[in-house]
Amino acid sequence: MFSRPGASVQEYLHENRSRLTKPISFVIFCSLLYSLFSHYFPIEGFFNQFERGYAEALGIEKTTLFNLFQWTENNYGFANILLSMFVAPWVRLFFRKSGYNYFEVLVLLLYVMGIYTLIYAAFNLLEILSGYAFHYWGVLIGLIYFVWAVAQFYGKSKKRNYIKAALAYFLGFFLFYFSISVLGAFIDLANNPVTKA
């Protein structure tokens, strides 16, 4: 999965399903590993910085919206499983001529997001050992890995595949956080309806 992720997942889908761990087991294992690691060695992520500053200034630290964002920050590995479900339709749309269905694309993304989670954990470890903010590099390297792995799956020789993979990730990422925002705002509104004065 590190050196030839696209070819490995294609082999899993078309030839030999016993060679790789099942995709959901793999991503859950990576997520659990990351969760255990981050529990015992917490890193000051973006949301924690947001929590101390903007949330308090805006007065939203006690809202459902805030709690949902906090959950995604504290459960990064599991949030990546949900994120994969939002990225998969975009990957399928941009690579629709390949003939892979949603579930086959989801298999690819679960493997890729599992490795992404391990990359992020490795950079968090570097941050703990060095004291420098390496987790931002983990996000960048993980994103580069994601784009490379998806492009490799669909044919790494085509440059446009890299652009489509990156675009699919960002659109899925935006849709994921937009959905969280709408859900949080809806729950907050339902719990605290606006009354006319």
Image: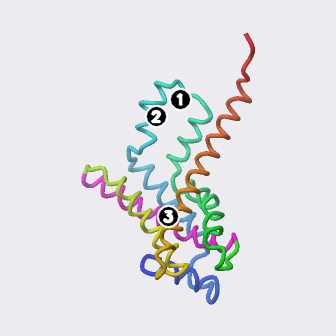
Dot 3: what SS? helix
Q: Quadrant of residue 95?
A: bottom right
Residue type highlighted by circle 3: Ala
Residue with the mark numbered 2: 51
In the image, residue 39 lies in the stretch drawn in magenta? no
Residue at (50%, 46%) from the top-left corner?
Answer: 73
Quick one: which residue is furthest to the bottom in this view? 15
Residue at (41%, 57%) from the top-left corner?
Answer: 139
In the image, which disc is placed on residue 15? none
Closer to the observer: label 3 or label 1? 3
Residue at (46%, 75%) from the top-left corner?
Answer: 159
Q: Quadrant of residue 168?
A: bottom right
In the image, which disc is placed on residue 61? 1
Residue type highlighted by circle 1: Glu
Residue at (42%, 43%) from the top-left corner?
Answer: 46
Residue with the mark numbered 3: 166
Front residue of 107/105: it is: 105
Front residue of 196/37: it is: 196
Q: Residue 37's spot in the image, x, y percent?
A: 43, 55
> Who comes first in sequence, dot 3 or dot 2?
2
The magenta stretch spans which residues? 102-130
Assess whether mark 1 and mark 3 are in contact (beta carbons under 8 angstroms).
Answer: no
Quick one: which residue is furthest to the top in this view? 197
> Who comes first in sequence, dot 3 or dot 1?
1
Q: Residue 43's spot in the image, x, y percent?
A: 38, 47
In the image, residue 108 lies in the stretch drawn in magenta? yes
Residue type highlighted by circle 2: Glu
Main structural element of the magenta stretch: helix, strand or loop? helix
Alpha carbon separation for disc pair 3 and 1: 32 Å
Dot 2: what SS? helix
